[in-house]
Amino acid sequence: MRIDFHTHILPLDLPDLTGKFGQGRWPVLERKCSCGADIMVSGNLFRKVTDQVWDPEKRIQDMDAEGVDMQVLSPVPVTFSYWAPIDQALYLSQFQNDFIAETVNRHPDRFIGLGTVPLQDMKAAIGEMERCKFELGLAGIEIGTNVNGENLDSPVLLEFFQMAEKWNVPLFIHPWETMAKDRTERHNLMYTIAMPSETALAAASIAWSGVMEKYPDLKLCFAHGGALFHIFYRGSIRDGKYGRS
């Protein structure tokens, strides 16, 4: 079986959260034609997307053409919204999680779903992870590489990792709000330098903080093959700078 683990999905009827909550940082999906749209953030183009982003039937057509048996669906990271007030961020998380669960339920032999949680608040994040796991039947949770500038070794996150291990919820860690954003705007450096470096920082924070010693059955997957972390880690071990993680 061929499984495409890293695919993002966004509901076409994404609500107008700027109008609802009155802040400009919410992602907005602007249709440009029947087959595409722009994701806008704060009035600026974030990314152009095609209708495969919201249309599972189009995805399945592509999957069949490419010989892919299943896709793992996860939210577009720009929707994490860790910066937002908790009630507003939870609203968006639940909206997306319901959409992903519905899509998986309609095509259970083609899709597996990952949810999202408002990681800036542990009570809300754990509560929504519990709903994703036990009510919606989603297979895991996608989280960002940092929470408002705090690395993933923050003591505040330990309870979340503990419950993810207890409930056997795999975590897919995806770069977002990357380091050096002001220095990587040109030459496609956001994708070739900033995102791999951001992922490496998140992985190193986990590896050397003792999180995996505390929660040895915690299941983690870092996006983009772990990016630069494997190079840094292997080099550090070879040079004798760090012990076993």
Image: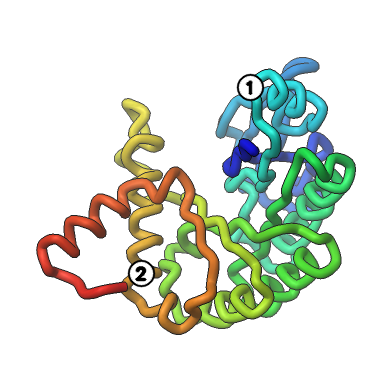
Residue that mark 1 sits on: 66
Q: Check the image and report above or below for 213 versus 92.
A: below
The residue closer to the viewer here, 234 or 157, is 234
- Element type where label 1 sits in the image: helix
**Residue type at tag 1:** Glu
Mark 1 or 2, closer to the camera:
1
Residue positioned 65% across, 38% down in the render? 1
Image position, residue 229 (x, y; %): 32, 54
Considering the image in quadrants, where does the C terminus appear?
bottom left
**Alpha-carbon span between mark 1 and mark 2:** 35 Å
Residue positioned 35% across, 76% down in the render? 209
**Residue type at tag 2:** Ala
Res 29 label: none
Task: Count how many numbered circles sit on residues in the image.
Answer: 2
Q: Please, which residue is most extreme toward the front here?
A: 1
- Element type where label 2 sits in the image: helix
Label 2 Cα crowd, 10 Å radius (few <14 / some 14-19 / many 20+): some
Left or right of 150: which side holds 15?
A: right
User: Which quadrant would residue 151 be assigned to in this image?
Assistant: bottom left
Label 1 Cα crowd, 10 Å radius (few <14 / some 14-19 / many 20+): few
Image position, residue 96 (x, y; %): 77, 50
Left or right of 33: which side holds 118?
A: left
Residue that mark 2 sits on: 207
Image position, residue 199 (x, y; %): 40, 53
Residue positioned 76% across, 28% down in the render? 60
Is tag 1's residue or tag 2's residue first in the polypeptide sequence? 1
User: Which quadrant would residue 29 be assigned to in this image?
Assistant: top right
The residue closer to the viewer here, 211 or 155, is 211
Residue positioned 81% across, 69% down in the render? 134
